[in-house]
Amino acid sequence: MNVPVPLPDLDALRAECRAMVRRRAALSASVAVVPLPGVDVATDLTLLMELIPAITLRFGLTPQQIDGLPLEKQALVYGVVKKAGSLLIGRVVTQELLLTVLKKVGVRLTVKQVARFVPVLGQAAAAGLSYGAMVYLGHTHIEHCYRVARALREGHD
């Protein structure tokens, strides 16, 4: 798929991707309850390494898909990406790139690390923070992809 989906399908695609994010966030939250240092962060990275490229692919915005577009469309995509401030669209997703993005929600992650060592309530708080951070990152990426795909479909930024 070299061209992003037609406009009428973008809203449905956004809803499907949001459901995908919620499923991964629930898994992230369930792992956050386990009081083993580092397991939750490793799980979050693994989930994001799968989730972000899957969303990008669904919107037709992987590096390979963008490279298949005419040059003027490529310029449009990268212009909208820059304006949106996305670090993930049109790039190969690496652990280093995801760690950079995770720093944006770093306070939540630090609180989560400390909170889960407090019996019961702390673990519940850690699960909630983990879920919230995953949803925040996923939904932000979906909105960036949606904005770029819509601009590409409409032919302007």
Image (tube, helix red, strand yellow):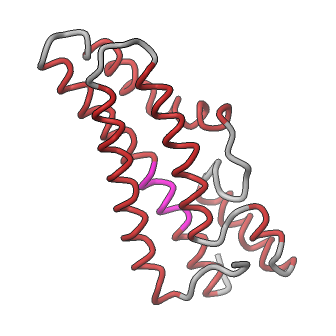
x and y percentages locating residue 7 in the rendered image: 51, 87
Q: Is residue 66 above or below residue 37?
A: below
Q: Is residue 35 above or below residue 133?
A: above
Q: Give the overall secondary structure of the magenta segment.
A: helix
x and y percentages locating residue 99 in the rendered image: 59, 30
Q: Is 130 positioned to the left or the right of 143 in the image? A: left
The residue sitting at 40% across, 79% down in the picture is 12
Q: Is 21 positioned to the left or the right of 100 in the image? A: left
Quarter of the image with the N terminus in it: bottom right
In the rendered image, residue 154 lying in the magenta stretch gets the answer no
The residue sitting at 48% across, 61% down in the picture is 142
Q: Quadrant of residue 49?
A: top right
The residue sitting at 75% across, 70% down in the picture is 65
Q: Is 47 positioned to the left or the right of 131 in the image? A: right
Q: Is 56 positioned to the left or the right of 132 in the image? A: right
The residue sitting at 72% across, 65% down in the picture is 79
Q: Quadrant of residue 121?
A: top left
Q: Which residues are magenta?
A: 138-145
Q: Nearer the viewer, residue 147 or 18?
A: 18
x and y percentages locating residue 146 in the rendered image: 52, 70
x and y percentages locating residue 10 in the rendered image: 48, 80
Quarter of the image with the C terminus in it: bottom right
